Image (cartoon, grey):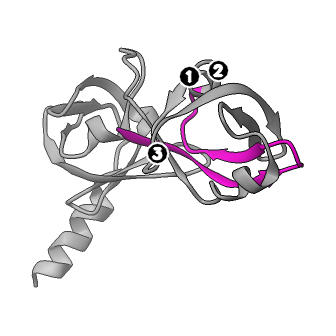
Amino acid sequence: MLEVGRITRPHGLTGELAVVMISNRQERLAPGASLATERGPLVVVSSRPHKQAWLVRFEGINDRDQADSWRNTVLLGEPIEDPDELWVHELIGCRVIDQFGTVQGQVIRVLDNPASDLLELDSGALVPVRFVVSFVAGEEITVDTPEGLFDEAAAVSERDET
């Protein structure tokens, strides 16, 4: 299960909840969608965007007191199969290979960045996701990067070794 969002607070008196989504997949909040929590599943009745969050009604939550008891609850969802999407859990641990066939390192984390998410490699390099040209889940990522992208990481690595 993947963390897809978090209930932040009640909204109004009728059980509606403010939810901040981590996932960019709006179908996770479609009517009938089920999200897992530590307290059991929640089924979406309705949802609508509101400011930087979503206002969501879940089955069985019908008043403000019930809604308040769900404050700060993490929402979990099953991975969605989509061959055109890159999923963070499938990127971690992958070897990154540049356009010349050189292994540049292994992905240790994915950093959220407004322009483009960044692959952080064990070599210290940061590679914008937009440079990914092919991908085999859990194994390798091929990137086509501008010249010099890996030079700074290599220089830092050499300094650390001396």
Helix, strand or loop at disc 1?
loop
How many residues crowd around disc 3 within 10 Å: few (fewer than 14), some, or many (20 or more)?
A: some
Please state, as top left, top right, bottom left or bottom right, where the N terminus lies in the image: top left
Q: Is residue 126 left or right of residue 10?
A: left
- Tell me the residue that label 3 is attached to: 37
Q: Nearer the viewer, residue 72 or 151?
A: 72
Q: Residue 158: where, in percent of width, then height?
A: 16, 73
Near mark 2 (Cα within 10 A), the count class, few <14, some 14-19 or many ≥20, is: some
In 3D space, how far apart are the residues under numbered discs 2 and 3 (Cα atoms)? 17 Å
Q: Residue 77 appears at what percent x and percent y?
A: 44, 34
Give the mark nearest the N terminus, 2 or 3: 2
* Residue at point 66%, 19% (across, down): 31
Magenta segment includes 20: yes
Residue 33: image tag: 1
Q: Secondary structure at mark 3?
A: loop
Position of 81 with respect to 70 (left or right) is left
Callouts 2 and 1 close, C-beta under 8 Å: yes
